[in-house]
Image (cartoon, grey):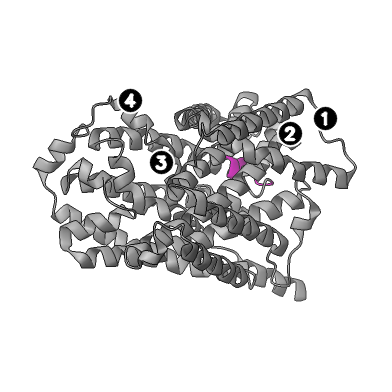
Amino acid sequence: MTTQASDDAAATRRLSLFALTMMVVGGMVGAGIFSLPRTFANATGPIGAIIAWLIAGTGMYMLARVFQSLAARKPNLDAGVFAYAKAGFGDYPGFLSAFGYWMSSCIGNVSYWVLIKSTMGAFFPVFGDGNTVVAIAVASLGIWLFHFMILRGTQQAAVINSIVTVAKIVPILTFIVVLIAAFRLDMFSYNLFGGDLTNGIFDQVRATMLVTVFVFLGIEGASVYSRFARTRADVGRATILGFIIVTSLMVLVTLLPYAALQRAEIAGLRQPSMAQVLETVVGPWGAVFVSVGLLVSVLGAYLAWSLICAEVLFAAAKTRDMPALFARENANKVPANALWATNIVVQLIVVTTYWSRDAFSLMLNLTSSISLIPFVLVAAYSLQLCRRGETYDVRPEERRRDLIIAVVATLYTIFMLYAGGLTYILLAAVLYAPGSLLYVWARREQGKPVFVRAWDWLIFGLTIAGAAVGIHWLATGYITL
């Protein structure tokens, strides 16, 4: 009776399909969507934007299908992103995937605080563009308030996230409805190919690629939290549902402003540009309405990503790919040490934004570049399974379809790395190189050799070389923050 009662209690604490979907939507609808009008207008017009979203949407849909397939075919691999990289390519690449995903999530969390303070800066100049001393102090207070709330319980935080996710969609839907009502075909036609932009469509599209990665981050949220799902099938369903919902919103938010303002005007707006566009159409209340929605949205996304950050570090420690220190839970079953490590890193990076010229853009692009490396490994692992036929003794008819999906997802993620440019790859290496010390620590705890294959040494050597070049370019001013 006692065992049955405890099993029933555990089942009721697990996340439903709706809650998992809200984790995906909550993670994806954050800072990025509110910055899309200006970010795209800086680079392209409606035609370029449509092409960019077709590329990004197709690539990310294939990546979502990869996560869905792996969730079904490898149900023993929890915590998704890094577990797949380890299974496919070994311990050190698996560690780098875990560390990179964790670090990109931490940097993404910093971008949320920068945008929150930049939004408040439109009403209270003391916050500036989100990187003044006052802005950093208030952001620091917020970091630790969220920290101690999450320490009270993961399930409680997930429920709060579901409520916040539903609430923050309202301003976005309002924005879409108002701009549809105010649609001007002549203005949209003028902006169609970028208005006064002189560069070609390919260059316009390439310039938008990193931001499309950033706004799609969170698509793997259900996979990361798979150990809390009521049924394994819900992980894949939540990923696809979340993708469809968010993609529809992002495409509309990007395209509709071109029917209200000239591209150059949109490009000149301050962030969050969605608020400024709505203010132009309906008056000052539009900026206030969207700004309040942004604050709710970003705080909700920050909550979702704080959970994901801690979960990734905790899961990697449980499989002994990170030091055992991060595998400890508190009385509320929260990975407390992993959460402490996450928020200490977030705090340090928030402080460094004081010296950045455009802190939000830097955090956005760096987050995207670092997160792409784990995504490449996930897609490549799915490709590996399809080529070998592993797990396809069950439902073998799906192998050809899954192979095509895995090929497209792999090519897409590699193209995204290329589109982002060498600068951000080198900055990623600057973070990956010292992070490898955690791998050395974990291997020493187990009494195992650090590197066991030539492949590991090659990856480590390339990481160190990339970090050295990145530091040199930073020191000489060739790369500026």
Main secondary structure of the magenta stretch:
helix
Q: Distance between the residues labelled 3 and 2?
A: 30 Å
User: Badge 2 is on which residue?
Assistant: 90
User: Badge 4 is on which residue?
Assistant: 202
Q: How far apart are marks 3 and 1 (CA)?
A: 37 Å
Q: Are marks 3 and 2 in contact (CB under 8 Å)?
A: no
- Judge from the rendering whether residue 263 lies leftward or rightward of residue 214; answer left or right: left
The single residue placed furthest to the right in the displayed view is 447
Please rate how many residues cluster around mark 4, counting C-alpha atoms within 10 Å: few if below 14, some from 14 to 19, many from 20: few
User: Badge 3 is on which residue?
Assistant: 212
Q: In this view, does 126 lie above or below 48?
A: below
Please rate how many residues cluster around mark 3, counting C-alpha atoms within 10 Å: few if below 14, some from 14 to 19, many from 20: many
Q: Which of marks 2 and 1 is nearer the N terminus?
A: 2
- Judge from the rendering whether residue 359 lies leftward or rightward of residue 230; answer left or right: left
Q: How far apart are marks 2 and 1 (CA)?
A: 10 Å
List x then y, in percent, for residue 61.
Answer: 44, 39
Q: Tell me the element at label 1.
A: loop
Residue type beneath disc 1 = Val
List x then y, in percent, for residue 265.
Answer: 21, 46
Q: Can residue 29 be seen in this view?
A: no
Q: Is residue 89 visible?
A: yes
**The magenta stretch spans which residues?**
69-76
